[in-house]
Amino acid sequence: MRVRIPGASNGLPVCAFVAKISNIDTYSVVFLAFKRDCTARFVVKGDEAVAASDYDEAIKLYSSAIGLDSSPDFSLFAHRSKANLGRNLCAEALADAEKV
């Protein structure tokens, strides 16, 4: 896997990039940026799964995004709620919708 980080040597393998970091604060910034990127990718793939009516996959992807996201991004619950509705999982959809 390769990671692209503004201001860093682009395209370094993640392990090589992390090995070059000597400051824990820098590591934290890089790690949070990586988590945000992964969360965004899960959401995009979840949206694609919903568009293809693959609601089980969408629910898994949105749940992964929620698990990675450390900020209270309630829109992730709205996405999963929509996927739950697609599977006729009304109680789960309502529980997610109430978090929005």
Image (cartoon, rainbow, N blue to C red):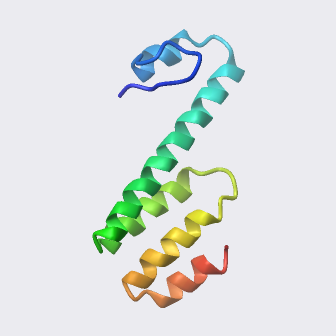
Q: Quadrant of residue 55?
A: bottom left
Which sits in the foreground, 12 or 60? 12
- Residue 94: give x, y in percent of width and height: 57, 85
Q: Is residue 50 above or below residue 48?
A: below
- Residue 32: give x, y in percent of width and height: 61, 36
Which sits in the foreground, 9 or 14? 9
Q: Residue at horizontal 44%, vertical 79%?
A: 84
Give the side of residue 85 with respect to residue 29, left or right: left
How many discs appear? 0
- Residue 75: give x, y in percent of width and height: 61, 65
Q: Is residue 55 above or below residue 39?
A: below
- Residue 70: give x, y in percent of width and height: 65, 50
Q: Quadrant of residue 16?
A: top left
Which sits in the foreground, 7 or 32? 7
Q: Is residue 63 above or below residue 12?
A: below
Q: Residue at horizontal 40%, vertical 18%?
A: 11
Q: Quadrant of residue 8?
A: top right
Q: Residue furthest front?
A: 51
Q: Residue at horizontal 44%, vertical 26%?
A: 3
Q: Residue at horizontal 42%, vertical 16%?
A: 12
Give the side of residue 53 with respect to residue 93, left or right: left
The C terminus, quarter of image: bottom right
The N terminus, quarter of image: top left
